[in-house]
Amino acid sequence: MFTLHVDDIISATFTPKENQCFKKELKSCWEISDLGPTKHVLGIAIMRDFNVKTIILSQMALINKVVEQFHQINAHSINTPMVASLQLQTPDKTILVPKEIATWIQ
């Protein structure tokens, strides 16, 4: 899988070998620069810990820029309704979704 934004490509593969093959194929057609693992994309910072297999996404830099742009540096912050330390999981597709929820999703 890969994403393309203007002239930047981010690739994600199941194995490093697949990623190397993808980059090799691109290099056979175009001159490209490999900038290594993605650290920022579209205002989102990406931090990985390969040892514990976690990914952290942060928009603090973008948020701070917007706060400054609209002169809200001294504004009072509030808590968001997001549950702290929420762990998202891939849904189990073998479990049927109740009818009332399925119609709401569509």
Image: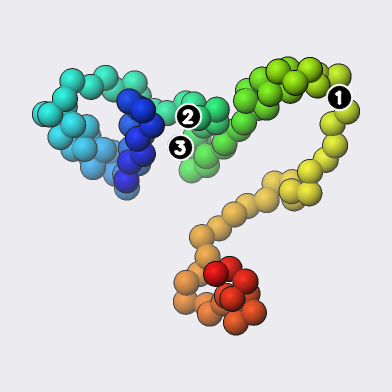
The residue where tag 3 is placed is: 50
Rendered position, 6 above or below 88:
above
Q: Crowding near pointer 1: few (<14 within 10 Å), some, many (20+)?
A: few
Q: CA separation, marks 3 and 1?
A: 37 Å
Task: Name which residue lies at 12% across and 29% down.
Answer: 29
Name the disc covering residue 41, or none. 2
Task: Name which residue lies at 51% across and 60% down.
Answer: 90
Amino acid beneath label 3: Phe
| Residue mark closest to the camera, 1 vs 2 | 1
| Residue mark closest to the camera, 2 vs 3 | 2
Place of residue 28 in the rendered image (x, y in percent of width and height, measured from the top left): 11, 29
Q: CA separation, marks 2 and 3?
A: 19 Å
Give whichever of discs 3 and 1 has the lower sequence position.
3
Q: Quadrant of the C terminus?
A: bottom right
Q: Residue furthest left?
A: 28
Rendered position, 27 above or below 22:
above
Q: Crowding near pointer 3: few (<14 within 10 Å), some, many (20+)?
A: few
Rendered position, 91 above or below 73:
below
Which corner quadrant of the image does residue 102 belong to? bottom right
Which element type, helix, strand or loop, lies under badge 1? loop
Task: Name which residue lies at 47% across and 38% down.
Answer: 51
Name the disc covering residue 75, or none. 1
